[in-house]
Amino acid sequence: MLASVESIVHWLRRRFFSRSEWAARHFGLRTYDDSGEEPGLLLIQIDGLARSQLEAAIAAGRMPFLESLLRREGYGLRTFYSGLPSTTPAVQAELYYGVRTGVPAFSFVDRTRGEAGTMFDSDWAREFETRFAVRTEGLLRGGSSWSNIYSGGADPAESHFCIASSGLGAWWSAGRVGPQLLYLVLQIPALARIAVLGLLELAIGASGIVGAILRRQWVALEFGMLLSRMCVGIGVREIIRVGGKVDIARGLPIVHVNFLGYDELAHRRGPDSRFAHWSLRGIDRAIRDLHRAAHGSRRRDYHVWIFSDHGQESTRPFSDEFPGGLQAVVASCLGAKAEGGSQPQWELWWRALSNRWSNRRPAGIQDPSPRHRFTLTAMGSLGHLYLAEPRDEAEMRELSQRLVSRGRVAGVLRKASDGAITWYHALGETAVPAGVPDLLTTHPEPLRAEIARDLESLCRQENAGDLVLLGWGPDGASWSFAPERGAHAGPGPEETRGFLLLPDATRLPAGVDHFTRPDALRHAALDLLGRRRMENSHVTNPAPARLRVMSYNVHGCQGMDGRTSPRRIARVIAAQSPDLVALQELDRGRARSRGEHQASAIAELLGYHVVFCPTIVSGDEHYGHAILSRRPIETVKSELLPAVPGGVWPEPRAALWTRVRLDTLVVNVVSTHLSLSPRERLAQMQALLGTDWLGPILDSEPAVICGDFNFVPGSAPFRLATARLQDVAKAGVPRMHTFASTRPFVRIDHIFASRHFRTEGVSVVRNGITRLASDHLPLMADLTWEF
């Protein structure tokens, strides 16, 4: 009854009050109207947030929703290694197309065309994405891309604020502005947030501009940062929030949204600044809304993965210490004089940033002497130096040493004519990749060899400079070649270590114990979506002396939102990784559940063995319960339990008795679902403990009885059970209510174990999915034995 009422409420809310559903219907957008059993993936990216900064933000209470995912929703925190260069264009090339080091930096020279450019330029980004797409299909095929460098394979109409798909003008001419602005007008809370936060940002930004005027520093950048905060940090964030919810309501197979606000502010004031961390509150709220929309979708069974592509190092602007910046240093080390004098680095950086909306190329410094002519591209903590004329080995080595010793560049990578690569730095010279791990003492040990290999790949990239200049060095130096206090692109310990938040049961490729890089996440996503199967996956094996048992009434797999989904039930189970699962109220061949064999469907998704016990049979339709196990199951007995004439809501009740072998231990496992009638429940409990069932073996053999018993602690059948068995819930908190899932007020689901076991832990699994998946919550116990 409660489930029916909740289902009607959810339907009414979707039909008449959901703005996302309204937009999907009235804007003529494509929708996927199926059973909701097809998997879907929502990828949420927080651009530029290092794992250490995420942990600091959570500890400070700035990201309460992400904290709740870790604490209550079964998510785990992993290290996401960006690869090199540690920039969004390179990360997304690897994530979308599996191409490592697809570009050598954010700004570089395309040697094929002989042109310098940046990935802010839509033509430039589109050109390189086309090259990647020749190799393989994009990860976002059939889905949508929000605020990314590339479309990722999404159709042009589904690529929003993506540099490779369009600039602002193309977005406008494509006719996408009108519908989305109209939809935004309907989002009264979003508009209110934009207005209030915009005024606040204006006040903060105005004070920054005044301070810059008084200090005579970077006034243009402060003004540009104010516009960026208001447009990217607030406006685009809110559009992404509402647009992403619409795409989820439509049931797109994959949706990737990217929040840029933190990265923008961290560049200006530093990655650990309060200024940058302030933006995380709004991002956290946006993620909360998208996560709830994903789990409430009727058109697809969405998984939600949250990650950052890279972090940022706290840096000092190179131009603050060396007048004229990196260009002047390079010119001096070459013995050249830049034409027209040295050009301030901030001007080049600002021009590069403006390329997002124009077709201008960043200019290198040109010396009138052919011998000294060069092109320099440098953004963040990585630069590439291209020489107009070749130099011999001795000259290149001398130039590299001079840039480090006299020019104070933190590191220089040089590839010799024989292919050998050397890293020049303040501590000396190091062969790449062999000697690099010993230099990376501030990096986690498992990452060191991977970074060494990627440094080699960076130098061998077809568009890399003759010399690769690094702002980070093993001596602790941390420069940015742009006027910013936070930077990324190089091999520093913070800029290479993003984070990855995944549900614990997520299948990943083998070899990701210590870190996950973009192509591994790509393989996992393709596997989840059923587009490419992983041959070898990362599986966490349970401890051999532990038995994790779950009892779960799944209500015919019909959730409180009215959606019937065995896949969702399987996700609930997988997140807890139990060894044994007792499921009640399962359908087989019933019209109301699409004729599915629900127990078999769940077991297949989990890779478990299964035994089904029907209690009601009507022709080809069956209804009953099941036991699932990681190990093979032997059925001992499956029979109806006693019925008392004149009982309340008469319905056949049965029990299923199985045996499961755990190494040398054989465990008796019984699943049941007792009557609604008090007299029948007592008689049925007496039967289960009697001579025809478990009575003779309880003292000599380990046994676990679990299910929906429809009685509460302290009742007569409960006292009868605990006279021979232990109630595992005694090891938990005083109130462990399992029914109803949305507002639990009573415990009628139980796990009873023989005296052979000791309860190590017990819990009721209550999170966003379990509140929707059934009208009961799962009860779970960890048991150990010492015999």
Image (cartoon, helix red, strand yellow):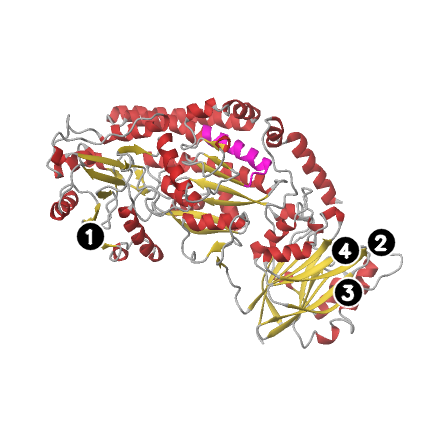
Q: Is residue 320 above or below residue 782?
A: above
Element type at mark 4: strand
- Which mark sits nearer the N-terminus, 2 or 1? 1
Q: Whole-percent x and y of residue 228? A: 38, 28
Category of crowding for the residue at label 4, using alpha-carbon neighbours closer than 10 angstroms: few (below 14), some (14–19), many (at least 20): many
Disc 2 versus disc 4: nearer the observer? 4
Q: Does 249 appear in magenta? A: yes
Image: 235 above or below 552: above
Q: Secondary structure at mark 2?
A: loop
**Which secondary structure class fits the magenta region best?**
helix
Under mark 4, the amino acid is His
Can you tell which mark lies on residue 622?
4
Which quarter of the figure has residue 547?
bottom right
State if disc 1 and disc 4 touch (CB < 8 Å).
no
In front: label 4 or label 3: 4
- Left or right, 725 with respect to 228, comes to right
Instruction: Classify 10 Å Cα crowding around label 1: few (below 14), some (14-19), many (20 and above).
Output: few
Local secondary structure at mark 3: helix
Q: What range of the chain is rendered magenta?
A: 235-253
Which residue carries the number 3 mark?
685
Circle 3 packing at 10 Å, graded few (<14), some (14-19), many (20+), is many
Count of marks, rendered view = 4
Q: Where does label 1 land, which residue?
A: 418
The disc at residue 511 is none
Q: Which mark is residue 648?
A: 2
Q: CA distance from mark 2 to mark 1?
A: 87 Å
Which residue is found at the position 59% from the left and 26% from the top? 27
- 59 and 113: which is toward the camera: 113
